[in-house]
């Protein structure tokens, strides 16, 4: 499982010109589900993401989590995070989980985020999405579980 976590002031996700999801201050989390990932990995990843101290406190130090700031998360499934670019110029995605299983684990991740009291918005699994986000910092973290 891989995630790219970006701190944002806001984000809007659209499909086919129609706004589907939007958040204010919080995180955009691009989540790639790898072959063999399971619910335990999802739970570990979600716990890390929601508790990651990447928001500034009153002293300007990165000491606050998305939970602490009462922020939101836009969760976007992104199998391309599992690309293998070691051979040739066309990445292969053999490391990505099959779509049915990946979708189930993606949705499970969203439900686990919600259990931490964090509002979660979703992308559309498998769709061609457009995401407009205003990055804050910028702060971008790559997490692999």
Image (spheres, rainbow, N blue to C red):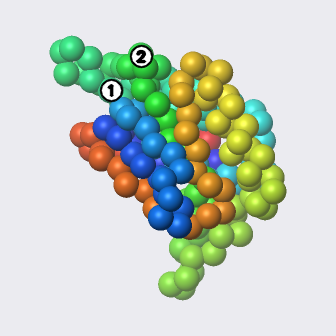
CB under 8 Å between discs 2 and 1? yes
Residue 55 marker: 1
Q: Residue furthest front?
A: 18
Q: Residue at x 42, y 26 (%)?
A: 71
Tell me which corner region of the image, top left, top right, bottom left or bottom right, holds residue 61.
Answer: top left
Residue positioned most to the left: 59
Q: Nearer the viewer, residue 97 or 28?
A: 28
Question: Is 6 situated above or below 18?
Answer: above
Q: What is the quadrant of residue 43 in the picture?
A: top right
Q: How many other residues sit within 10 Å of disc 2, few (<14), some (14-19) or many (≥20)? A: some
In the rendered image, residue 100, in percent from the top left (x then y), is placed at 81, 56
Residue drawn at (62%, 55%), measured in percent from left and top? 124
Please tell me which residue is depicted at 50% across the width and 84% down the height of the picture.
89
Residue drawn 78% across the image and 61% down it: 98
Give the percent coordinates (x, y) of residue 115. 65, 21
Q: Secondary structure at mark 1?
A: strand
Q: Position of residue 67 (x, y in %)?
A: 47, 20
Can residue 82 be seen?
Answer: no
C-alpha gap between disc 2 and disc 1: 9 Å
Q: Which mark is residue 68?
A: 2
């Amino acid at each position: 499982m891989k995630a790219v976590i970006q701190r944002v002031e806001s984000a809007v996700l659209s499909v086919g010109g129609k706004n589907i999801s939007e958040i204010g201050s919080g995180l955009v989390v691009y989540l790639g589900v790898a072959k063999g990932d399971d619910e335990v990995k999802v739970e570990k990843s979600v716990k890390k993401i929601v508790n990651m101290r990447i928001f500034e406190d009153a002293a300007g130090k990165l000491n606050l989590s998305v939970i602490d700031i009462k922020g939101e998360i836009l969760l976007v499934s992104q199998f391309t995070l599992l690309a293998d670019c070691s051979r040739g110029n066309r990445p292969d995605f053999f490391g990505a989980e099959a779509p049915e299983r990946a979708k189930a684990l993606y949705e499970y991740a969203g439900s686990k985020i919600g259990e931490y009291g964090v509002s979660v918005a979703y992308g559309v699994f498998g769709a061609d999405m457009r995401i407009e986000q205003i990055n804050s910092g910028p702060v971008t973290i790559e997490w692999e579980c």
